[in-house]
Image (tube, grey):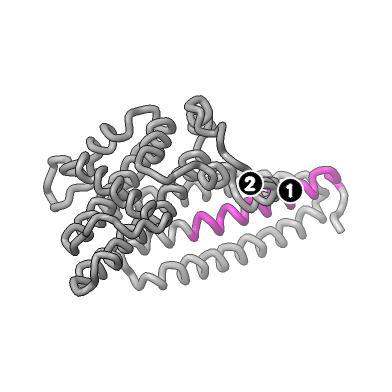
Amino acid sequence: MGDLLRMAAEAAALDSGYLRLFPVSGIAAFEVFFRATIAEILDQSQVYLQRLSEAGLLKETKLDWTLLQAVVGRRITVGELVAHVLPLSSFGHLDRVLTSVLAKPFRSAVGEVVLRTPRIEGDSVPTPILQEPDADCECVARCFALRHQVAHEDYAPEELDQPTIVGLLQGLSRLTQAISELVDQELYPDAPLTQAEMNQQAGAVAQAAEDDLAAAWAGFQSVWASFPEEVGYHGRQALDALWSSFQALRSQRVELAARALDGGSMAPTIANAEYAAATREFAAAVRGLKSLYEPDWGTRPD
């Protein structure tokens, strides 16, 4: 959307016929965003899909065999499937879909949504994203109408000058941001907002993975403790070597992941995420090994 705004601002020499293609392109980008957002909502909980069904929005959807095969083969999610077939040719469609899934009037909800982080450091007053929500909704409605005109080869459209086109794209951009924030607040109300909070949360996730691994490792060690002394001794040596190798490999993965950011503020988040991923993978492997040995306690493994 930013690129379209920049190009539109530099397109003063183009006539109205070309200028009106900018909001048409903008609404195409918006549709991609909107369908991806609806898919994310629907995949979050069956409650949202049920709301769509109760609103009657699934009655006229058309599902072809290729799409159904993709769902069965798990190449796409149910949310992606439904979002793909929902009608979206006007602002009214957008309004009805979001009103249904969020269970509240979309236009009033999007007009009240505020940024959870201040625009200016130290500003404690919540800032509404849409200063004039009705005007911005009207901008989006006009963009949909322009796309309809182009699709149906209407060669007698309204004359549009460059400032009008830029204004339409700005309204579309603001509404896109507001919808994104509205959905984030619905799905992830407790998500961290600042980088410091993200780093802290990533550290907590890494610690949880470490605690889970400790439990898995203790369970695996209990299997070897029940073997005869000779087998148990060699087994414990093998476990010590396995543990040391894992720690060395995990340290290398974390170092490489953090090095990509060269010490930036995101480095702790990235490092902890890689730490947690490596730890969860090893914990799963440990539990798999434990299940292999458990049925034959007291015998030497092959």
In the image, residue 87 sits, relative to residue 170, either above or below, namely: above
Q: Residue at x 69, y 47 (%)?
A: 65
The reply to whether discs 2 and 1 touch (Cβ–Cβ < 8 Å) is: yes
Looking at this view, is 291 or 111 the one in front?
111
Residue type at mark 1: give it: Lys
Q: Could you tell me what secondary structure mostly forms the magenta stretch?
A: helix
Residues rendered magenta in the picture: 274-298
Mark number displayed over residue 123: none
Instruction: Give the percent coordinates (x, y) of residue 93.
Output: 41, 39
Indicate the quadrant where residue 94 lies.
top left
Q: Residue at x 35, y 73 (%)?
A: 262
Q: Residue furthest top?
A: 54
- Residue at label 1? 290
- Along the line of sight, the residue nearer the viewer: 267 or 302: 267
Place of residue 29 in the rendered image (x, y in percent of width and height, measured from the top left): 39, 57
The numbered mark, 2 or 1, whose residue comes first in the sequence reads: 2
Q: Is residue 235 left or right of residue 185?
A: right
Residue at left offset 44%, top offset 57%: 272
Residue 162 position, x and y percent, is 19, 64
Residue labelled with disc 2: 216
Q: Is residue 276 magenta?
A: yes
Q: Magenta segment: does it hold 277?
A: yes
Q: Secondary structure at mark 2?
A: helix
Q: Is residue 236 left or right of residue 23?
A: right
Density class for disc 1 (Cα within 10 Å; few <14, some 14-19, many ≥20) is some
On the image, the x and y values in percent for residue 196 come to 29, 53
Query: Could you tell whether 223 is left or right of 105 in the image?
Result: right
Q: Quadrant of the N terminus?
A: bottom left
